[in-house]
Amino acid sequence: MNNITLGRYIPMNTVIHNLDPRYKIMAMLTLMVAVFLPSGFYGYSIIACFVFVVLLLAKVKIQMIVRALKPMIFMLSFLLIINILIIRTGYVLFTYSGFTMYSDAIFQTLYITVRLFLMIIISTLLTVSTKPLDMTLGLEDLLSIFKRFGFPAHEVAMMISIALRFIPTLIDETSRIMKAQASRGVDLKEGSFKEKIMAILSLIVPLFVSSFQRAEELADAMEARGYAPSAKRTRYKQLKTTYKDVIAITLVFGLLGGIIWISL
Amino acid sequence: MPIAFEKVSYTYAPNTPFAYEALKEVDLAIEMGKISAIIGPTGSGKSTLVQHLNALLLPHKGTVTVLNKVINSQQKTKDLKSLRQHVGLVFQFPEYQLFEETIIKDIMFGPLNFKCTHEEAKNKAYKALSLVGLEFDLAEKSPLDISGGQKRRVAIAGILAIDPEVLVLDEPTAGLDPQGAKAMMELFVKLNKEEHKTILIVTHDMEQVLNYCDNVVVMQDGKILNHQRVSDYFERGNQVNEIHMHLPPILAIKEDLIEKGFKLEGEVTDIDTLAKSIAKELGYE
């Protein structure tokens, strides 16, 4: 259960790690918009180069990205098959016993592949280089713009940070209960359909029970310390904009501008 | 020796920055038909060790032999299911694994997984229920509606119902009140004496080691530091300090008395034997 590498924060001291999380989140969103613009071969090459440079700057190991992308291959090959069967545009590549394959089937799949890969890499970059807590701080600041429309920015940020905090706990818990039930003869791989349902039940019910229990305890602990969501709070950690953040966001906006210009 | 570890190494998350070697070339042979305690500081590899006993973890190097079954890194998990019928493992806080609607159904879950008929499973479940000292009228209650100590008993009954020859318990008394803990330990002694089960207990409580166990395995940093009879282990008090744990109070008093010039003879295991040897030293027979 420890092999969930995708998106796990890796503590390091690089330019990217030290950027203000608010700007990093904005940059990520901007890059996502750029990825979704139909900018053709040149556009995607530019974005890919940019992302690659950022990867190098953040000292993210390329193997890690490759490992993160591997599970996608199954989905993408499925997509390729569907596209080959459905898409009937572009020029004919070949005809085999009455079945014709069109060039757009390949191009469409490539298109989606590139977009998906870029999206995953960009979001991985954000999570790998930003502490979950910093991320929620940044998110809270960004969302507080909507506060005047009644949006509960602080509450949402708190919920996200609690959720993030409990992911590792839940993973540990899951593997513990799996092992405990395996000791009682549960076999998740073998067995009839009914046995498999029982196996999954034996995992999910205890997980739910302990999650609810934990949630209750956490709520009590927070209330005992006087937590009130609506209270005005100060922060120990203050986010500060530096010239590096400005440069970074300018570069990203510049990139988006360029992509828009290309795709027009 | 039906349970033997030979040069067993185990690493968590190998080939990543988070790699952690929990067991380092462990050699160990467990005596059958006895109660063995496994002690050691947190992170010394106790839990990792016991999870090898029913092949929840496979050794990365070396072999584990359990009841004539050889477990090594190449083993297919498919062949290991039968092993889990013979080695019952009770995890820390086992009450979290309860999930059925009724207590009796939950206890029957194990035997049913090992291909018992419904009738057999029911018989075994009731037998286990009485072994752990629970009333039969609890049987139809939900396992979520009973107290923490009772839940623990139900969970242990769930393993006992499988009727394993070897019973492994990871801190079975953690979080129980003193009476509950005592009753629990007495249950294990009873299982050992009457049902002739081999029992392994991971514990932090030195008093339990002294009062209920035959052998003690001391672990530190993924290695076996010591493996001997309990009485021999406590003979030299300073051995316990080596792993930063405390002597049971009764032995601590004995050590203090000896330090102050008392000459205490005979084996001291509880208040009675201590009182006797003090009386002897003072000349009262």
Image (cartoon, grey):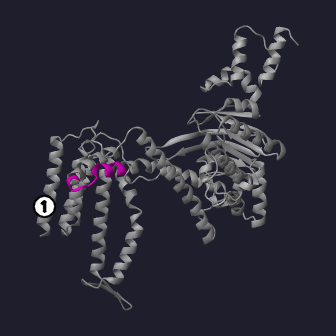
Vertical side of A190 occupied by B247: above or below: above
Magenta span: A147-160
Q: Position of residue A92 (x, y in %)?
A: 27, 85
B14 or B271, nearer to the observer: B271
A85 or A185, nearer to the observer: A185
**Which residue extends farthest right?**
B285
Residue located at (36% from left, 75% from top): A80
In this picture, residue B283 sits left or right of residue B143: right
Magenta residue check for A155 = yes
Q: Position of residue B240 (x, y in %)?
A: 65, 25
Q: Which residue is mark 1?
A: A258
Residue located at (37% from left, 60% from top): A69
Q: Secondary structure at mark 1?
A: helix
Chief secondary structure of the magenta portion: helix
Magenta residue check for A112 = no
Identity of the amino acid at label 1? Gly
